[in-house]
Amino acid sequence: VVIGCCSIIIMVSIGIGTNESQEVMLSQMGDLTVINVYSYGRSDNTTKLDKATLEQMRMIKGVDLVTPQADLRVNFSLYAGRTRRYQAQWMNIQGMASGATEKLEYPLLSGRYPEAPNEILVGEYCAYNFMDSKRPERVNMVDRYSGGFDENWNPINVPDPFFDITKEPLTLVVDTGDGNKPIKVDLKVVGVMKEDYSKSWLTSEGIIMNIDDVERINSEYKKITKSKEKDEGYNQVIVKTTDIKLVEDVETEIKGMGFETSSMESIRKPMQEEARQKQLMLGGLGAISLFVAAIGITNTMIMSISERTREIGVMKALGCFLSDIRKMFLLEAGCIGLMGGIVGIVLSEIISVVMNIVSASAKAPITDFAGIISALTTKGARISVVPLWLIGFALVFSVCIGLGSGYHPANKAVKVSALEAIKHEG
């Protein structure tokens, strides 16, 4: 029983650890609850990603957030500093719904998420796109790659930019053409995003504004320039579900509306199926061990009955109920399963801890107690995960194996003749 219980727990825990590692790996590639919806390739030419369509998507069960992504499609310059000393001729500016960056968990290095109009988030290296108008041409920008790269090709010894973008006034100036008055918008930087390409490339050098501000600027630009460009809706929309399990259903419904979608579900689902198959295979191996244990318990109980035949006869002669005799033998079999299950659980926990520590130390030496705790609790780093439900299942299963194995011997015990049992010499 100990070996069988231990086999089931360890085998299944390895499968759970594999699944957990895959989930962490996929989450590093992007949010697993996010669905990207595109307007191109739609089957119905009359359907477009406009505000009415977005409202329909918000009504889908399980949808937590729907935010369009709209680029600032105008010629503009950005100025920083009270005297507009610093200037950027090129920058990616994108609009998103209010509160979207917070729900999408865009990482912040400092500050907060935008709340009011004209409040913006800037990428970690946004300030490096500005040139200093008071410096000569070849030294008027800071090269953040000048410090070299590490073994993973990440820049090191990054020099500081010319100014702190969170402390200098920022002005957006839109060129509306000859003879037209430019559009000027004072922007307030309220937060700096940490570079994370799994979230968006904007976290590096871009700017995120409230989509209402972007649409207002685009609309004002069209009005001044008298542009006749038709409104084709949004090119891309982000849909976030309340749970990873709902992604497939929500994505299917959006596709039914005639739009192309992409999500991590197409990668996650095959990997999850593979992990589940491994769990079943490993659990099956453990179950075989428990089956062998069940045969052993049955054999032990039958031998016990043979050795205690006289005792059974005495109990019958004294008027003991047959049901009590059956219960006694079943209780003994159940206790064998229970004790074996408890020992198996403790042994499994020890093996799981050793496996995780050895695995973690192979990647990086563990020198203190904090390193051990990290090896046992860090998701994605553990190769064996023993949840409480698995412990409970293994314990109940071990007891059931014991009871099942003892059922036949218990019935055999109650069928023994009292007279023959008393005469038996054991």
Image: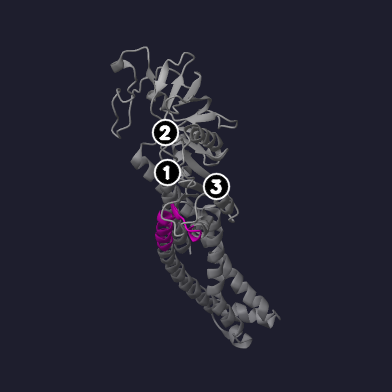
Q: Residue at x 42, y 41 (%)?
A: 198
Point out the stretch of residues depicted in magenta: 255-278
Residue 240, compared with residue 201, is above or below; it is below
User: Which numbered disc, 2 or 3, marks the residue that appears first in the sequence?
Assistant: 3
Disc 3: CA contacts within 10 A as few (<14), some (14-19) or many (>=20): many
Residue in front for this viewpoint, 109 or 138: 138
Rendered image: mark on residue 66: 3
Locate residue 363, reporting x and y percent.
34, 40
Was residue 267 drawn as part of the magenta stretch in this picture? yes
Q: CA distance from mark 3 to mark 1?
A: 22 Å
Q: Relative to 116, does residue 394 appear above or below in the rendering?
A: below
Please say if the residues under marks 2 and 3 sit with CB atoms less than 8 Å apart.
no
Q: Badge 1, how many Cα within 10 Å: few under 14, some, many 20+?
A: some
**Residue 245: x, y in percent?**
52, 56
- For residue 92, the mark is 2
User: Which SS class for mark 2?
Assistant: loop
- Frontmost residue, 270 versus 185: 185
Q: Quadrant of residue 316?
A: bottom right
User: What amino acid type is highlighted by mark number 2?
Assistant: Asn
| Separation (CA) of disc 2 from disc 1 | 23 Å
Q: Is residue 163 visible?
A: yes
Q: Residue drawn 39% across and 22% down?
A: 130
Numbered tag placed on residue 28 in the rendering: 1
Outermost residue toward the right in this view: 319
Q: Is residue 111 magenta?
A: no
Residue drawn at x 56%, y 32% is 114
